Amino acid sequence: MTAAAVRVAGVTKSFKDLRVLDGVDFDVQRGSIFALLGSNGAGKTTLVRILTTLSKADAGTAVVNGFDVSEHPAEVRQSVSLTGQFAAVDDVLTGRENLALVARLRHVEQPDLIAEDLLARFGLTGAGGRPASTYSGGMRRRLDLAMSLVGAPTIIFLDEPTTGLDPEARREVWRATRELAAGGTTVLLTTQYLEEAESLADRIAILHRGRIIADGNLAQLKALLPPAKVEYIEKQPTLEEVFLAIVGDEGKAAA
């Protein structure tokens, strides 16, 4: 087993004449939140697909939980879970039934007990008997994350998990992600939101045009810029801050 939960070295991937990944290198330490930050088309999802054995690299090596993704794909799949940009939730089933179904599909013992435990862990016990179609965006994402934890994977890949969510729902996902890492789960997060990477990640790698152009913790990345010029200005609240201040606890209770 390697010391790192994920190790990527020289990974390249092209689709016909389009080079999507061009020699990507980085490590993800166990129990940490690692953010892969980049704009649309930077290659984030392609890289996640390679790391989760859904696609093959043209060159380079990728090791996940000590297993080479090309040589031992089955072992990799057993130790990871993937949550994509859209929640993989069955709207007809209740939250409890969604979780129990995934547990049965993964041949986990006592699926009903697992479902109850995860509902409690993600604050969904009260909504467990309701169809998922009645859930808010944040609740659906929390249910999706709970489903990802069935079978106790050691590494979770979150591919732009807050795309399309409102500010409150996005913060619900952030809280759940922090709790995953606090429990020892390694999280590799892809995002195009700078605030998300800054709020969550222990380390951030910036992927641009298929290459990692910066990699480090927030302080290290800020040190790449010239010293800040001190100016005194009146800070105006952002629209997001205004929204959250007005909605407050009432909006959270409605979810």
Image (cartoon, rainbow, N blue to C red):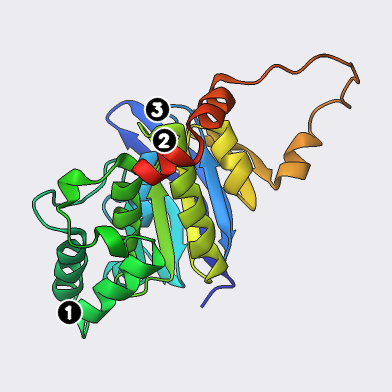
* Mark toward the viewer: 3 or 1: 1
Q: Residue 202's spot in the image, x, y percent?
A: 64, 53
Q: Residue 218's spot in the image, x, y percent?
A: 71, 43
What is the quadrant of the C terminus in the image? top left
Query: Mark 2 vs mark 1: which is more N-terminal?
Result: 2
Q: Are marks 2 and 3 in contact (CB under 8 Å)?
A: yes
Instruction: Check disc 3: other Cα within 10 Å, few if <14, some if 14-19, many if 20+.
Output: few
Per the image, label 3 sits on a secondary structure element best described as loop
**Which residue corresponds to the image point at 40% horizontal and 68% vertical from the top-left?**
121
Q: Amino acid at mark 2?
A: Gly
Per the image, label 2 sits on a secondary structure element best described as loop
Residue designated by label 1: 107
Q: Nearer the viewer, residue 119 or 100?
A: 119
Residue 151's disc is: none
Residue designated by label 2: 43
Query: Mark 3 vs mark 1: which is more N-terminal?
Result: 3
Q: Nearer the viewer, residue 114 or 207?
A: 114
Q: Quadrant of residue 213?
A: top right
Asked whether the viewer can see residue 13, the reply is yes
**Which residue corresponds to the image point at 64% horizontal and 50% vertical from the top-left?**
203
Instruction: Check disc 2: other Cα within 10 Å, few if <14, some if 14-19, many if 20+.
Output: many
Q: Is residue 203 above or below residue 194?
A: below
**Which residue corresponds to the image point at 44% horizontal and 39% vertical from the top-left?**
250
Residue designated by label 3: 41
Q: Nearer the viewer, residue 150 or 223?
A: 150
Q: Are marks 2 and 1 in contact (CB under 8 Å)?
A: no
Asked whether the viewer can see residue 208, the reply is no
